[in-house]
Image (cartoon, rainbow, N blue to C red):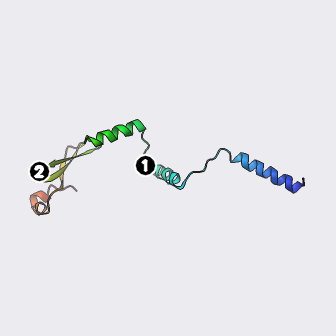
């Protein structure tokens, strides 16, 4: 084997051994990792996630806000501050100044 051939084999062997600890990721995995680094995603244990899903399915509050519907109005309750505001109502109801003052901001 010539020196050039030996050098090529040696370089190929070094490159193969040097990259053996790496793994290719898909574009989707790459995007998810970038979002995690930017703080857009948060990792949650799968058992915690399953419990949150069950709670949401039965209507249990899983966050800071609770929505309550009374007659034709939907109110949002902030469970931290105890304040509530009007989230949804009819178009005619919004025209009332008293109702507008209770609107969520």
In the rendered image, the vertical position of residue 4 relative to residue 44, given as above or below: below
Measured from the top left, where is residue 30 in percent x and y?
53, 53
Left or right relative to 54: residue 84? left
Position of the C terminus by quadrant: bottom left
In the rendered image, the vertical position of residue 47 relative to residue 98, given as above or below: above
Instruction: Kindly identify the residue that appears in the image at 14 percent across and 57 percent down.
Output: 101
Measured from the top left, where is residue 6 in percent x and y?
85, 52
> Considering depth in this image, is 100 or 68 the residue closer to the camera?
68
Measured from the top left, where is residue 87 in percent x and y?
20, 54
Of circles 2 and 1, the one toward us is 2
In the rendered image, the vertical position of residue 63 relative to residue 34, given as above or below: above
Instruction: Kindly identify the residue that appears in the image at 60 percent across and 50 percent down.
Output: 24
Question: Between marks 2 and 1, how big is the CA–CA gap?
Answer: 37 Å
Mark 1 Cα shell of 10 Å, populated few (<14), some (14-19), many (≥20): few
> Considering depth in this image, is 57 or 14 the residue closer to the camera?
57
User: What residue did someone put label 1 on?
Assistant: 41
- Contact (Cβ within 8 Å) of mark 2 with mark 1: no
Measured from the top left, where is residue 45 in percent x and y?
43, 38
Circle 1 SS class: loop
Which tag, 2 or 1, sits closer to the chain's start? 1
Instruction: Kindly identify the residue that appears in the image at 42 percent across and 38 percent down.
Output: 46
Instruction: Kindly identify the residue that appears in the image at 55 percent across and 53 percent down.
Output: 26
Left or right relative to 60: residue 18? right
In the rendered image, the vertical position of residue 79 relative to residue 97, given as above or below: above
User: What residue did someone put label 2 on?
Assistant: 71
């Amino acid at each position: 084997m010539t020196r050039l051939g030996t050098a090529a084999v040696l370089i190929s062997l070094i490159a193969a051994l040097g990259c053996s600890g790496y793994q290719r990721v898909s574009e989707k995995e790459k995007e998810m990792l970038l979002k995690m680094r930017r703080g857009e995603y948060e990792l949650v244990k799968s058992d915690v996630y399953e419990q949150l899903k069950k709670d949401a399915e039965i209507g249990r509050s899983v966050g800071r806000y609770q929505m309550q519907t009374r007659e034709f109005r939907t109110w949002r309750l902030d469970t931290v501050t105890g304040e509530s505001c009007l989230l949804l109502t009819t178009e005619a109801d919004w025209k009332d100044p008293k109702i507008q003052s209770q609107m969520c901001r």
